[in-house]
Image (cartoon, rainbow, N blue to C red):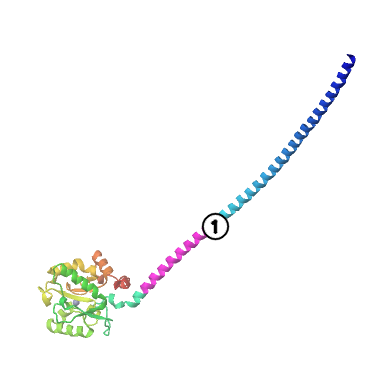
Amino acid sequence: MRMKMTILKIVNWKNVLKTLGVLIVLAGIVGFGEYRNRQLSTQIEGQLTANTSEIQMKIDALNSTLAEIQSQSSNLGNTVQSIQSNNNVYSAQAGQISAAATTLYKLSKTDPQLLQKYSKVYFLNENYKPANLTNLDPNYLFNKNSALQINTQISSFLTRLLVAEKSAELNLKVISAYRSFGTQALLKSSYKVTYGAGTANSFSADQGYSEHQLGTALDFTTPSVGDTFNSFDKTPEYTWLQNNAYKYGFVLSYPADNKYYEFEPWHWRFVGVDLATRLHNEGKYFYELDQSTINDYLAVTFD
Ligand SMILES: [Zn+2]
């Protein structure tokens, strides 16, 4: 029994030792594992931290590049805007230069005499003759055989006036148009013979002072009045001219109470639509304006 106990003791001791040994080995393994785990965690953590900060640095660098690009792009935008605004200035300047050039070109093609004031004060050279003359349509003439001529530049304006007047069922006729220096001299001397110099001077200009020499002045009448001009101002044709002639560029040169001649309701002169409209609206007549004011209309008158 004692022996059995001893053997048992020995066996148990061995088992205990074995078990202990196994336990120690296991603990060692577990401990080592734990140690390695910790070590790896620390390594991974360190690696992750390093990677994160590297990525963050890259993000920061990208952000700064982006900001730089945005700033450059905004600078570029400003530059484009400033170029565009310069272009607008240049094109406005080009427009002004071109308008000025057009005006100069028109002036170079416009006869400065056409808006000159003529009367007992202002003189037209005896050699002056309009550059081009056009025959009037005989249907509009008081005497169909009189073969009257006008300055070609006003031809279309006069035709439109006569067509408009006809459509108002009136019967306006042209009795006198362009008169050369010589013709005016002959006419004036015949008036002097018929009426005496004093009377003739009150209604007929001397040669060189007549608007008729320009080819832009016309004498109108109507069959009921005829070639005496008496009471033309009482006719519906005259009333129509007063209300409408300015729309076609014509004005009454010598209205009632003017300082130059007697009232000549039959005598109308082309001065261009703009100037005629101004005179109509202001209730003024051509000879009241300064020549310098009139000259502003020269370039636009014969468009
Ligand atoms: Zn006349």
Q: Tell me which secondary structure the magenta stretch mostly adopts.
A: helix
Q: Is residue 1 magenta?
A: no
Task: Locate residue 169: give its quadrant.
Answer: bottom left
The answer to whether one can see residue 6 in this image is: yes
**Front-most of residues 161 and 53:** 53
Q: Position of residue 105 (x, y in %)?
A: 36, 75
**Front-most of residues 132 and 124:** 132
Q: Position of residue 246 (x, y in %)?
A: 23, 68
Over which residues does the magenta segment extend? 77-104
Q: Quadrant of the C terminus?
A: bottom left
Amino acid type assigned to the residue bearing label 1 in the image: Asn
Task: Locate residue 7: give its quadrant.
Answer: top right
Ligand 1 resides in the quarter of the picture at: bottom left
Q: Residue furthest right?
A: 3
Disc 1, SS: helix
Residue shown at the point (83%, 28%) measured from the top left:
21
Image height check: is 143 above or below 289? below
